[in-house]
Image (cartoon, grey):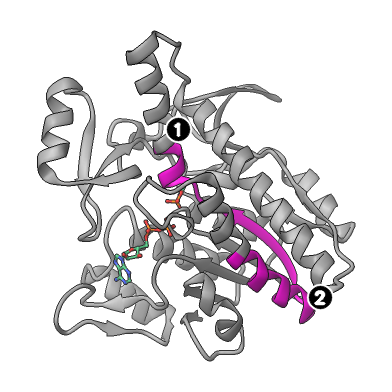
Amino acid sequence: MEKLVIVAIGGNSLVKDNGRNTIQDQYEAVCETAANIADMVQEGYNVVVTHGNGPQVGFALQRCEIANEVSGMPTIPLVNCVADTQGGIGYQIQQALTNEFAKKGINKKVASVITQVEVSKDDPNFENPTKPVGSFFTLEQAEEMRKEHPDWVFIEDSGRGYRRVVPSPKPIDIVEKDAIKSLIEAGYVVVAVGGGGIPVVKTGENTYDGIDAVIDKDFATSLLAEQIDAQTLIITTGVPQVCINFGKPNQKALERITVEETKQYVREEHFAKGSMLPKIEASLIFLEKSGSSVIITNPESLKDAITNKAGTHIVK
Ligand SMILES: Nc1ncnc2c1ncn2[C@@H]1O[C@H](COP(=O)(O)OP(=O)(O)O)[C@@H](O)[C@H]1O
Ligand SMILES: NC(=O)OP(=O)(O)O
């Protein structure tokens, strides 16, 4: 089989205008990324695609809350909002890739798998929400919302503004991993663990129940990469490269770093919690368990990053 590469598309990389963009705007962003992924497939890479949903799941929650306030419509639980966004974004990726393959004459089919990801109901992250979702707000806007919803928690997200945070337990197992593997072996380009997967807890040996949370797609992707034996993990996000001293006058973009150097930068707190840190932590887990290399870059640099001309490369 060709080299197996897993590409994780960041939810924020599909949003251009802080929640004011339309589904069509999001589809255009998906199409840009899909064109780059199709180029990789044309080069002979065997690609599995995962994606985030941080902004989109927050928008979905917000729509429910507004509909509830305005007309009393029942709200939708967070776990179902995750499922909805997994389906909605997965549909766009599946269609965009299918169309790109047809345009480029690539003989490949795409299949998306509705993916449940097991978490533990005792995960301490349920008590300590850390996953930013939805739009960015000013401090004043966040304080105003907290007056009405004192249980909502906000954090400052990488200098971009304040965002609501929700619990983000660590993924333990991918329920549909065998189906994903079978589709890969049958030659499909598979889209899976969208939005980090739909969080579920075990209720019996083979039974599950949904639980309200948003799993970090970088950790879920790293787990899937290990389970399908992928060699390379590529994370696309809003920046072309990972930086040290991010946002400071002495900011420096990183081209190639070893696992040991990366751990040192983590200790020096160069990577923001809830944004770049999970990508780095997930990359380290992947490299220490099974993977050989990680690339972090933005969608437009994907093709150059594969040939070492762009992105941040983390190597063993
Ligand atoms: N050290 C860093 N280097 C580069 N970007 C960083 C760093 N720390 C925080 N960031 C921010 O993290 C963002 C990526 O996280 P985020 O937008 O949450 O991811 P996603 O694309 O998966 O939605 C970047 O766009 C950047 O604004
Ligand atoms: N679920 C998740 O991690 O989404 P983002 O990558 O969009 O933050």
Q: Earlier in the sequence, mark 1 or mark 2?
A: 2
Q: Position of residue 2 (x, y in %)?
A: 81, 75
Crowd rating for badge 1 (residues with CA inside 10 Å; few <14, some 14–19, many 20+): some
- The kind of residue tagged 1 is Ala
- Asked whether residue 231 appears in the rendered view, the answer is no
In the image, what residue type sits under mark 2? Glu
| Residue 60, label in figure | 1
Locate residue 140: give its quadrant: top left
Looking at the image, residue 22 lies above or below residue 15: above
34 within the magenta span: yes
Q: Nearer the viewer, residue 37 or 30?
A: 30
Tell me the residue that label 2 is attached to.
2
Q: Looking at the image, which residue is at 20% across and 60% down? A: 159
The residue lying at 70 percent from left, 76 percent from top is 40
Q: Is residue 110 left or right of residue 117?
A: right
Residue 109 among those drawn in magenta: no
Ligand 1's quadrant is bottom left
Q: Quick one: 33 or 274, which is closer to the camera? A: 33
Query: Residue 282 location in percent, x, y?
Result: 46, 60
Towards the viewer: 124 or 239: 239
